[in-house]
Image: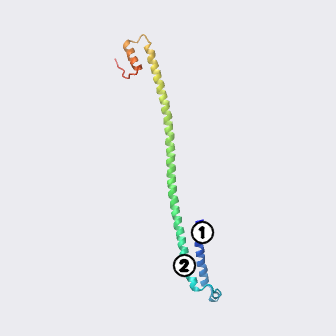
Amino acid sequence: MKKILFNIVVYSMLAWTMITAGYMALPIEIQEMLPQMNWITAVISGSSTLLVGSGGLAVQSFLLKARTASDSKYKVVADKYLEVADAYNSLDTKYDNLENKYDGLKESVDRNNLLQEASLQAKLSNPLIDAETKKLIEDVLGGESDVKEG
């Protein structure tokens, strides 16, 4: 609304300048038919509205350039934000994939540990294994982690 009102004021000032220029171009006989206006009023009001109206056009042009520059900067920032958001989504997806692979690997290692424990339990019940090896197996199954080689 402000922009429309501003345009109306600026263009009406420029229109008044043209009207006063047209008045000055009229022959003197026609100018005398319009007693409300004389050449001094036409020159002063026409030149002042020309200055103010052209100043308004300059301000309007400056604001348009500033807005265009601001819009282009906003567009650059918005594009960079979208790039960062896409990169984050990509990393989030990769993280989820790695987390799933880690969970699968952990399950596999846990299962392998259970199988190793079952294998060691089975070896304990074997009568052909000597006592020293049985002691090592019992130590490992009991929670000790150093296995002595013998």
Name the residue rendered at 51%, 47% in the picture: 85
To which residue does mark 2 refer? 48
Residue at coordinates 51% horizontally, 52% vertically from top-left? 79
Q: In what quadrant of the picture does the N terminus appear? A: bottom right
Rate crowding at label 2 as few (under 14), some (14 to 19) or many (20 or more) other CA atoms within 10 Å: some
Which residue is label 1 attached to?
A: 5
Q: Nearer the viewer, residue 53 or 133?
A: 53
Q: Is the C-beta separation of discs 2 and 1 under 8 Å? A: no
The alpha-carbon separation of the residues under discs 2 and 1 comes to 20 Å
> Identity of the amino acid at label 2?
Ser
Q: Quadrant of the C terminus?
A: top left
Q: Considering the numbered disc 2 on the image, is that residue within a helix, a strand or a loop?
A: helix
Q: Position of residue 29 (x, y in %)?
A: 64, 89
Q: Residue furthest left?
A: 150
Q: At which x and y percent is residue 76?
A: 50, 55
In the picture provided, is 141 more to the left or to the right than 72? Answer: left
In the image, is 133 to the left or to the right of 54? left
What colour scheme was applied to this rendering of the protein?
rainbow
Residue 60 vertical position relative to residue 125 in the rendered view, above or below:
below
> Would you place residue 62 above or below residue 80 in this image?
below
Residue furthest out toward the top? 127
- The residue that appears at 51% across and 43% down in the rendered structure is 90
Q: Position of residue 34 (x, y in %)?
A: 64, 86
Numbered tag placed on residue 75 in the rendering: none
Tell me: residue 135, above or below residue 59. above
Q: Residue at x 58, y 66 (%)?
A: 3
Say what secondary structure mark 1 lies in: helix
Using residue 134 as the reference point, say whether residue 9 is left or right of it.
Answer: right
